[in-house]
Amino acid sequence: VQLQASGGGLVQAGGSLRLSCAASGSDFSINVMRWYRQAPGKQRELVASVTNWGNTNYADSVKGRFTISRDNAKNTWYLQMSSLKPEDTAVYYCNAEVSQLSKYDSWGQGTQVTVSS
C-alpha cells in the first residue's frame, strides 16, 4: 500500500492548514491512520491517530487545535491544523496500520509545514 501526503506549506502563526493522506493499493484495509511530525534536531513524534471505528488520540501539544478525520470510502485521512504556532513547524508524515494478508505499517513521504512568527 502506498501513501501520498499533501497539503503542507508556509503559514503565519495563528493560521490553518489541512493535510491529506491518500492510500492506494489492492485488497487492503486500514486499521489505524496516524500523523507524525519531525522537527529539525528532534525525534519523530506521534501527533494524532484515528482508528477504524473512529476513536481519536492527540498529542497534548496539539489538543484543541488539530483534528484528525478519515474518509473510509476514499482511504484518505486528514489533519486539520488550526491556531498554528511556530513550534508546529516540522515535516509531517502520514502512517497507517495496514491489513493486507498480514499487518504492517506503511509510511507516506513527508510534507513540510512551516509556521512563521
Image (cartoon, rainbow, N blue to C red):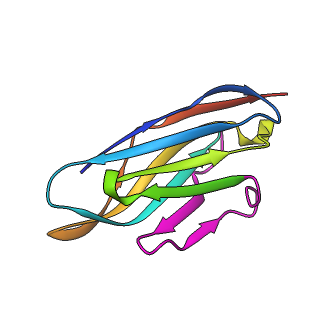
Q: How many marks?
A: 0
Q: Is residue 6 above or below residue 61?
A: above
Depth check: 48 or 75 in front? 75
The residue located at (49%, 45%) in the rendering is: 93
Is the C terminus in the top left, top right, bottom left or bottom right quadrant?
A: top right
Q: Horizontal and vertical percent for residue 94?
A: 46, 49
Task: Give the quarter of the image for residue 14.
Answer: top right
Depth check: 35 or 18 in front? 18
Furthest residue toward front:
73
Would you say 73 lies left or right of 6 here? left
Q: Horizontal and vertical percent for residue 75?
A: 33, 53
Task: Give the quarter of the image for residue 19.
Answer: top right
The residue located at (60%, 51%) in the rendering is: 43
The residue located at (73%, 44%) in the rendering is: 82
Depth check: 67 or 4 in front? 67
Would you say 92 lies left or right of 1 here? right
Q: Is residue 81 above or below residue 86?
A: below
Which span is picked out in magenta?
A: 40-65
Q: What secondary structure prevails in the magenta region? A: loop
Residue 40 in sight in this render: no
Task: Give the quarter of the image for residue 73.
Answer: bottom left
Would you say 109 lies left or right of 34 here? left
Residue 63 in sight in this render: yes
Is 26 included in the stretch rendered in magenta?
A: no
The residue located at (77%, 34%) in the rendering is: 15
Q: Is residue 65 above or below residue 83?
A: below
Q: Horizontal and vertical percent for residue 24?
A: 25, 46
Q: Is residue 82 above or below residue 51?
A: above
Would you say 32 lies left or right of 85 here? left
